[in-house]
Image (cartoon, rainbow, N blue to C red):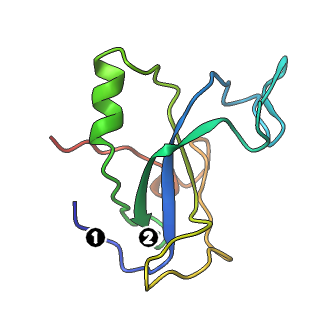
Amino acid sequence: MASQCEGTKICTLSVITSDWISKECSWINASNTKPWINRGGDFSRQDQSLGFAAKDGGIENYDITISVNAFLNGNKTNYGFLLEPAANTSEANYNPMIDHQYYSSEYPDIRLRPALILEY
């Protein structure tokens, strides 16, 4: 899928591999009673999709077809996705994600809240 983004900062979208609670999770804990196995969240590096960071309110594209099919077929449990700056990439136009930010689903400006748009 071609990127509709104007940015050159690369992000990765990874499959989360353990259960978590949105209003309770932190860098250390998946919930008030359960720590992450790996600080920052438990996710699969083999199930990643690269995308270009968009400006506030912009669209970012990630091809998650394989992961969604695995969820639908019952081969993986759907705990969601983790979006983060790409730490290492061989892409020629990679720029570090120093000043890019994302907003939560509770952010007051609804135009900046994340949304998932599925194309099939």
Classify 94 as above or below 10: below
Residue 53 image position (x, y, % from top left): 47, 69
Q: Which mark is residue 93?
A: none
Q: How many marks?
A: 2
Mark 1 neighbour density, 10 Å: few (under 14) some (14–19) many (20 or more): some
In the drawing, does residue 30 fall left or right of residue 120?
right
Q: Indicate the secondary structure of the residue bearing disc 2.
A: loop
In the drawing, does residue 36 fall left or right of residue 87?
right
Residue located at (50% from left, 32% from top): 80
Q: Nearer the viewer, residue 42 or 45?
A: 45
Residue 6 image position (x, y, % from top left): 36, 80
Residue located beneath label 2 in the image: 54
- Whichever of callouts 2 and 1 sits on the residue coming sooner in the sequence is 1
Residue 117 image position (x, y, % from top left): 30, 45
The amino acid type found where label 1 is placed reads Gln
For the N terminus, which image quadrant?
bottom left
Q: Indicate the secondary structure of the residue bearing disc 1.
A: loop
Q: Residue furthest left?
A: 120
Residue located beneath label 1 in the image: 4
Q: Nearer the viewer, residue 50 or 119?
A: 50
Classify 109 as above or below 73: below
Residue located at (47% from left, 19% from top): 77
Dividing the picture into quarters, in which one does residue 17 lie?
top right
The amino acid type found where label 2 is placed reads Ala
Q: Nearer the viewer, residue 4 or 67?
A: 67
Classify 109 as above or below 115: below
The reply to whether the C-beta atoms of the residues labelled 2 and 1 are less than 8 Å apart is: yes
For the C terminus, which image quadrant?
top left
Residue located at (50% from left, 76% from top): 9
